[in-house]
Amino acid sequence: MLHIPLWKRVLIFGLCALGLLTAAPNLFYSRVEAHNDAIAAAEKAGFETPEQAAARAGWPDWLPSGLVNLGLDLRGGAHLLAEVNVAEVYKARMDDLWPELRKALAAERATIGAVRRAPGPQDELHVQIGTPEQMAKAVAIAKSLSTPVVTLTGVGQSDLAITASGDELIVSLSEAEKAATDDRTIQQSLEIIRRRVDEVGTREPTIQREGEDRILIQVPGIGSAAELKALIGTTAKLTFNSVKGRGSNPDAAPGLGNAVLPSADENGIYYTIDTTPVVTGEELTTARPEFDQNGRPAVGFKFNTSGARKFGEYTAANVGQPFAIVLDGKVISAPVINQAIPGGSGIITGNFTVEESTNLAVLLRAGALPAGMTFLEERTIGPELGQDSIDAGRIAAVVGFAAVVGLMVASYGFFGFLASVALCLNVAMLFGVLSMIGGTLTLPGIAGIVLTMGMAVDANVLVFERIKEELKNAKGPARAIEKGYQMAMSAIVDANITTLIAAIILFVLGSGPVRGFAVTLAVGIVTSVFTALSVTRLLVVIWFAWRRPKTITV
């Protein structure tokens, strides 16, 4: 009875020590943060300034340096809710289609007659033909320019909806293509915004889709909403460059006019490219997932007039050679030119899945926002307000902790004191786990910590009350303690599993601060069960082995 093997004791104390060690950097938040920022800046620049060296020396390198990230409501920062104007994409598609359709119809001028673009809604292309009797032929020509809509579930209906009214041919995007275009537009916008925000080194930004056509952007640590809007408006650097070589040495001499860039997808692979681009992302008009002639997923792209001319001349002179698609200083793809591409439209083939081709199309279009955005909501949370939230949360946590400890000691005496010691370790381990996983602490997260304190001692209350019942049944103290933990186990596990399920549902269905609360609650459940069933029990066993009491009072 009341025996815990040595290996289990070492494991329990070891986990507690690890939790305390990983949580310790949060007690010196500013110093450790400066240490981490200095290391990151030096690695990015390739050298270290004296100021960075001093900041790095402020915290020992051999100690853990993980921190709990502070959310927008605690650190301060900017909050934006943007609506993506997807209708602009429909208009751009129709404008891009018109030259191609005009050329195809002009080839049949003898029967169709003269063609011209007529006024119409922005998301529709109205074409007036000279011979209305030949409208069926004009419709067939327009349909020949359509392509199947590619989705993750396969090939669907045509991307163009074509009708006729009198002497006018009316072309618009089909409903399936509009839905696919909306999704691509939002995903491209998310990718662009995420890349722009990540460049400035902000911590734990929240960038996610809200509803059909809105994007929520929350960036802690940035000065103002106006600064964030300016940052989002920046254009990504997308270029198409000729490839001079491929290898695994990042320090290889590239030669005059060349550069060595890492591959985005192939670890340890570097490409030597000509720094003068063949074409740039500003000349790319579209990129979308398609299927090649063999039915395999691929990515189709198209340049504007100037880009098509330059790309056509380059591909004609470099058949069989690879060219690099470079996005933000990384080679995201390096396909081989199979044939000359004079029309400005091409296809990138490879061992893609449909999802990979869709993602590559997103990356290709990530050079510029695919559509304008209207900012519906702007908020700037100053660091002073964030500090006020931290102070208020700290006071709430301290008051809650003191109340719980006071109640436990008053109710259960020395056993309540041992439960309070375990509670301290529980909070420390909670912060340690959040630091290791890079979790973000928000104001609702602090509420989750306070809730965890109450739930942690709730398990001890069940155990102690069960020990009382066993003592009333004339059991000896050792047997009563042993039975108390055994009989309360199922109730503790059941209660915490149901709460953990609720936390998982909040995380999956929630967003922003709700997720922060869910993460804190879930981690707190795990640490509180561990401390209640292992740490408190070990402390009771050590005390009992030391004192050997004939009777106990709980």
Image: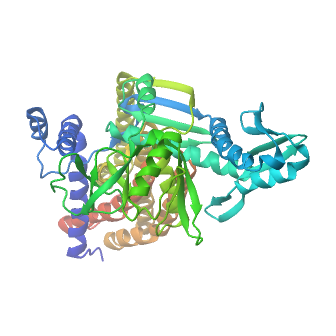
State the image quarter where residue 55 is shown.
top left
Indicate the position of residue 210 as horizontal and vertical percent values: 59, 41
Rendering coords of residue 552 (x, y %): 31, 62
What colour scheme governs how the chains and residues are painted in the rendered image of this protein? Answer: rainbow
In the rendered view, would you say 242 is above or below 442? Answer: below
Seen at 11% across and 32% down, the residue is 51
Report the number of numbered marks.
0
Residue at x 39% of width, y 56% of height: 317
Looking at the figure, which quarter contains the C terminus? bottom left
Give the x, y percent position of residue 64.
19, 51
Q: Nearer the viewer, residue 242 or 458?
A: 242
Asked whether 279 or 543 is in front, the reply is: 279
- Name the side, left or right, on which 94 lies relative to 277: right
The quadrant of the picture occupied by the N terminus is: bottom left
Q: Is residue 245 above or below residue 370?
A: below
Does the image show residue 499? no
Q: Nearer the viewer, residue 381 or 321?
A: 321
Q: Is residue 242 left or right of residue 342?
A: left
Left or right, 241 with reference to 59:
right
Res 404 visible = yes
Percent coordinates x, y for residue 231 in the rendering: 41, 30
Asked if residue 184 is positioned above or below residue 299 in the image, the reply reads: above
Q: Residue at x 60, y 71 (%)?
A: 295
> Front-most of 548 and 340?
340
